[in-house]
Amino acid sequence: MGSPVTHWQVLTTRPEVVQEFYAALFGWQVRDDNTLGYKLVDTGTREGISGGLWPISPAEGRSMVQLFVRVADVRAHVKQAEALGGKIIIPTQTLPSGDEMAVITDPDGVPFAIFKGTGNLPL
């Protein structure tokens, strides 16, 4: 099994401003009618991968883009990432749906999430 990038998200301290920016610039539509209140982005095409906006507080970090990579074994990838110089930001956790996920930074400090689940993003 490969490890595809299946989803992206913009972490933002100003979700309404960012949502309006991308809607005006690209025509993206945003929905937040899910159990987590996550802001799913509809880019208006089947090309590329889908994404979302995740509101964060200034205490939770800085605004950034984060990729989601689907893997077969989250715990094994977390262990391997640490051995390769990555830093675990959010340890492996099981989400309400049963999906597993963790957030890691690469050796240069760029964050990404890994997950095991049936969809294109962890729920």
Image (spheres, rainbow, N blue to C red):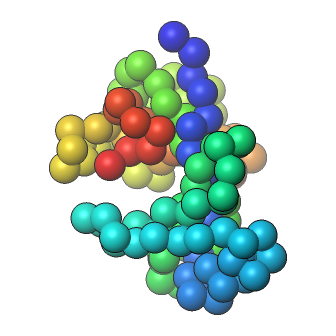
Tell me the residue at 57%/23% (across/down).
3
Inspect this view and state whether residue 120 appears. Answer: yes
Q: Which residue, as the protein is rendered here, is positioned at the far right?
A: 25
Q: How many marks?
A: 0
Q: Position of residue 53 (x, y in %)?
A: 54, 68
Tell me the residue at 44%/44% (across/down).
121
Judge by depth and name the residue closer to the eye, 2 or 22.
22
Tell me the residue at 59%/71% (across/down).
29
Residue 79 higher or lower than 25, as above or below: above
Q: Which quadrant of the structure image shows residue 117?
A: top left
Q: Position of residue 88 (x, y in %)?
A: 48, 45
Q: Which residue, as the protein is rendered here, is positioned at the far top?
A: 1
Tell me the residue at 47%/52% (across/down).
89
Residue 81 higher or lower than 106, as above or below: above
> In the image, 14: left or right of 88?
right
Q: Which quadrant of the structure image shows residue 42?
A: bottom right
Judge by depth and name the residue closer to the eye, 70 or 51.
51
Q: Position of residue 113 (x, y in %)?
A: 51, 44
Q: Which quadrant of the structure image shows residue 38?
A: bottom left
Judge by depth and name the residue closer to the eye, 33 or 105.
33
Q: Position of residue 94 (x, y in %)?
A: 24, 42
Inspect this view and state whether residue 66 appears. Answer: no
